[in-house]
Image (cartoon, rainbow, N blue to C red):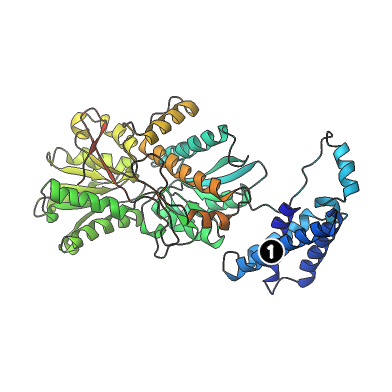
Amino acid sequence: MRDLAGRVGPVIGSAQACRDIARPRIQTIADKFSQVIREASSNEAERSDLTQTFDRSVADGRAAVSSGKIDCIRADRQLADLERSISGPSLSSVIGPSPAAAATAANAATAPTAPVPTGPLPRGIGEKEIRFGIAAPFSGPARELGRQMKLGIETAFNRINDAGGVDGRMLKLYAADDGYEPSRTAEAMKQLYEKDQVFGIVGNVGTPTAAVAIPYALERRMLFFGAFTGANILRNDPPDRYVFNYRASYVQETDAVVRYLVKIRRLQPRQIAVFAQQDSYGDAGFAGVAKAFRSMGVNDGAILRLNYARNTVDVDDAINQLKLAKPPIKAVVMVATYRAAARFIEKTRDLYPGLIYSNVSFVGSTALAEELKLLGPRYTNGVIVTQVVPAVSGYSSAVLEYKNALAKYFPGEAPDYVSFEGYVAANVLIQGIKRTGPQIDTEKLIDTLETMRNLDLGLGTQLSFGRSEHQASNKVWGTALDESGRYQPIDLE
C-alpha cells in the first residue's frame, strides 16, 4: 500500500497543480484511493500512517509541476493512464483488495492471472524491461559508425542483463536507420518514440542529425544520452536538462591536436588547414581549430577550410584549394567520416609526402584504418586520430572488461573505438539507472545523473555530471597509425 501511495499520489498531486485538468476526474481517483486505504488498514494507526504517506506523495506531485520537472501535458497523460488502469468495478478491487478478497486471491495464487497493475509506469518502462532507442546510420557511407555504436551499447546492455538487469528490469535497445541524413531523422525518432515506445535515446550518431533529433526529444522531455558527436549543439550553457554527453567535444579534440602540431611538431599556425564536412559537423570541428588559434593570439580569419559534401567522397575541390595555398600547408586537421578522409589522404599523399593528417574521433578509427590499409603502408603511417576513450590496444581495466564482454556476446567482432565509446556511454547510463532505484522516471533519473561525481570506470579519468555540467569526460587521448595499420598511443602534450 505504501508503494501504491507513492505511485498514485504524485499523479494526483501533479494533476491538482494544473488548472486545465477537470477537478472531478482528480477527485474521483482520490476518493477511490482513500477508500482503498480504509479497506486495507487493520487499525486506526495503520490507516493514519498510510494516509500521511499518500498526502506526502500528493504534495510531491504538486511540487514537481511548480518546479518545472513535470508539465501539465504529461500530468494529464499520467492521469489518463491511471484512469485506464483502474477502469472496471472499482479501484479497490483492482489495486487494493479488501482483506477478504486478498485471502481469496491468496488461495488462487497458483492459477495463472494477469499481473496486477500498480499504477502507471512511465513510457518505455515495464515491470521487466526498460526500452531505449538509437537513431543512427545503418545504411549509406557512414553505416559502420551506426553499427559500431549499437554494438557497444548492446554489449554493455547484455552484460548487465546477464547479471539480472537493473532492479530486475532488462535493458533493451531499439534501432532506427536515418542514413546520416537529417531529412530522415525526424521519422526515425518518431518510430522510436511512437512505435517502439522507448523511455529514452542513447548513442545517436551525428551532428547534422542531432540538430533534428534534439528538438524532438526536448519537446517530449525525453532523455537524450551519450550521442556520438562532440558538437556544441549538445553542449549549451546552461545545459539542456534532458541532454547528457559522455565524451569530450570536437572543440576540445581539435584544440588538443592544434596545440600538439604547434608545440610538439613545431608548425606555424598558418601551415595548418582544415578539411571538413560541409555541414554542422564540419562547422563544430572548425570552431575548435579557430578557438585554438585565438588562444595562441593568431587571427582565425586566415584559416584555410577545405570542404566536401556529406555522404560523398568528392574531395577534388578541396584538393584544388590545397594546391593554391600559400604558404604551403604542412598539416590538415580533418573533420570528416572515414571514406572521405581516406580518399583525401589517398589523393594528396603523393602530392605532399610530408603532410601530417589528423582526424577527430567521429571519423571511425577502425573503418579509417581498414580503408587506408587497402591502399598500402605509406598511406597509414603517421595518420593521427584523437580519441575520447583510451587505446583499445591497451590493458586498462575498462579496456579489458570491454574486450571480454565483446568477445562473449559478439564473437568475431574486433575491438573498435566507436563501439568502445558506446560501451562506456551505456555503462555511465547504467550507473545512473542503478542509483535512481526501481521507481524510475525521466525526472528522477536526470536528478540522479546530476549528482553523479567522480565515477571511476577504469578509464584513467573520473567522470562527473552536475546541474550545470552535462558532459562526463573532458579527456582527449592521442593515437597514430603505424605502417601495419595499428593505432599506437601518442602524447599530445
| Residue 156 appears anywhere in the view | yes
Which residue occupies the foreground of this view, 60 or 136?
A: 60
**Badge count:** 1
Amino acid residing under circle 1: Arg
Which residue occupies the foreground of this view, 177 or 491?
A: 491
Which residue occupies the foreground of this view, 381 or 128?
A: 128
Q: Quadrant of residue 11?
A: bottom right
Q: As drawn, is 268 to the left or to the right of 401?
A: left
**Residue at position x 63%, y 42% from top?**
129
**Residue at position x 9%, y 55% from top?**
326
Q: Mark 1: which secondary structure? A: helix
**Residue at position x 36%, y 52% from top?**
230
10 Å neighbourhood of mark 1: few (<14), some, or many (≥20)?
some
Residue that label 1 marks: 56
Q: Position of residue 239 (x, y in %)?
A: 43, 62
Q: As drawn, is 278 to the left or to the right of 202?
A: left
**Residue at position x 47%, y 54% from top?**
183
Q: As drawn, is 204 to the left or to the right of 110?
A: left
Q: Position of residue 70 (x, y in %)?
A: 60, 64
Q: As drawn, is 257 to the left or to the right of 139?
A: left
| Residue 317 appears anywhere in the view | no
